[in-house]
Amino acid sequence: MPTFEYAPAPESRAVVTIEKSYGLFIDGTFTRPKALFDTINPADESVLAQVTQAGPRDVDKAVAAARRAFDGEWGALSGAERGKYLFRIARILQERAREFAVLETLDNGKPIKETRDVDVPVAAAHFFYHAGWADKLEHAGLTPSGGPLPRPHGVVAQVIPWNFPLLMLAWKIAPALATGNTVVLKPAETTPLSALLFAQVCQQAGLPAGVVNILTGDGRTGQALVEHPDVDKIAFTGSTEVGKAIARSIAGTTKKATLELGGKAANVVFDDAPIDQAIEGIVNGIFFNQGQVCCAGSRLLVQENVHDQVVAKLKRRLETLRVGDPLDKNSDLGAINSRAQLERITRLVDIGVAQGAQRWSPECSLPATGFWFPPTVLTGVAQTHRVATEEIFGPVLSVLTFRTPAEAVAKANNTPYGLSAGVWTEKGSRILWMADQLKAGVVWANTFNRFDPTSPFGGYKESGYGREGGRQGLAAYVTTSPRTPSSTTGDTR
Ligand code: TAP
């Protein structure tokens, strides 16, 4: 059994055990590994482990296990008892935080300071937050007073992407369990390891068998799962293209769905903004997680009279970023998650240059192996350029200008997406006006990329529908429709 030892300092050594191969987590146990594929470290292309490609029969078994748990032990539990399991999981995530941080960095390529300070603690926070809701759902305002009690849907299929593997898992599993559902989750093909470690956490927490099932595999597994006839609800995070395919596949069925899809956020900087603070927000907005963030501030809209000042300061700041070994706690940017993603970023940037944008990157020497892309700024971008309209999902900032607030709003909203936006200004009244005008699910003011389990997250237009997080996020996991004669379990007592 290979182990990986991470020792930034002798006193903080973390040992991560990575199995040679992994089976699926179905009905509380791991199956025998079969139909294996590699999961690699994108920072050096070494094979970390082999995982199982789940087929339709595995999907059947996992959904059946989730159904038995829902109709049986889990469905009969009170909200307070469910909450105890969520608290237990949250505490184990904290106890094993270093292990999760190192594993996630190895499998995903993101810098250890992000997995250590954001992904893992925020994932634990989601379990703590939802643990608190489990016995208070009737007070969540999900139904009019005197209306029927909110009830779980049943078996939930959850499909997540590779950019925040553990965090997206927590966003999905915590509210589903708090509301009394059972889960079959498929992590992304390139980042399955933290979900498999989470399966061990479920065992450690004594979670009843079948409540959480983890199926590794590629898009075919995801498709078989969401199309399974005994799934009651789908929670999907990923590309708009796949989101649309899922919406089409469930049309005419009784399945419910929440879709968290792509984005092309505008980060709007007015001339009265605290410029140095805005520079930090711009950098965090687009270079956090190598820009592989659905809500990344990938379009910088800067007021024309401060454009040169902002771009000059931004370039000076980017000279200080360190790109390299994701396990080095001083690295600001790590590796791109996969060769396919690197090729997509490279292709779109080349198209941007061909269409007339000027490309700039700070001097940085990139490792010879692995998937790397330097932090990049594209200036002279026009609204019609593809780098201004398409999601690049990489460390690439497209800079556009505006003269008036109305023009800023028009340009910011000129996208099929509507996930997030940022506003930088000293004027409180302008912040409120902009928040009202921008068609985005989340609007940050004088900050960017802040996440909290109490705050709902989700999009408009082609960024999807439904919310995750906060009281609103619970609504996606319950029904208030009258009971059918057979739906006698799953009370949220
Ligand atoms: P996708 O290709 O859409 O993949 C997302 C997940 O769906 C993966 O687990 C994938 O499996 C699976 N999948 C692929 N085809 C499927 C199908 N036909 N039916 C069901 N599942 C299928 O996206 P990605 O490249 O992993 O992630 C990047 C995208 O996700 C970006 O557009 C980004 O904006 C979006 N994203 C959105 C959010 C929110 S909250 N809105 C958060 C993170 C990412 P494989 O991995 O094996 O292909």
Image: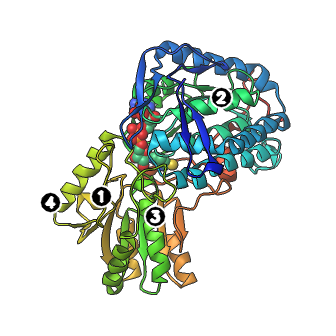
**Above or below, 89 relative to 210:** below
- Residue hosting label 4: 354
State the SS at label 2: helix
Between the residue at mark 3 and the residue at mark 4, the CA separation in whole angstroms equals 25 Å
The image position of residue 198, as x and y in percent, is 62, 33
State the SS at label 1: loop
Task: Kindly identify which numbered label has been placed on residue 285.
Answer: 3
Task: Kindly identify which numbered label has been placed on residue 200.
Answer: 2
The amino acid pointed to by label 3 is Gly
The image position of residue 318, as x and y in percent, is 37, 69
Dot in front, 2 or 1: 1
Between the residue at mark 1 and the residue at mark 4, the CA separation in whole angstroms equals 25 Å
| Residue at image location 66% in from the left, 53% down from the top | 453
The image position of residue 203, as x and y in percent, is 71, 26
In the rendered view of the protein, which quadrant contains the N terminus? top right
Between the residue at mark 4 and the residue at mark 2, the CA separation in whole angstroms equals 49 Å
Q: Residues within 10 Å of mark 2 (few under 14, many from 20)?
A: some
| Residue at image location 56% in from the left, 36% down from the top | 194
Q: Name the one closer to the observer, 488 or 347.
A: 347
Dot in front, 4 or 2: 2
Q: Residue furthest front?
A: 10
Q: Residues within 10 Å of mark 1 (few under 14, many from 20)?
A: few
Whether pointer 3 and pointer 1 mark residues with C-beta atoms closer than 8 Å, the reply is no
Q: Is residue 148 visible?
A: no
The amino acid pointed to by label 2 is Gln
Mark 4 or 2 closer to N-term? Answer: 2
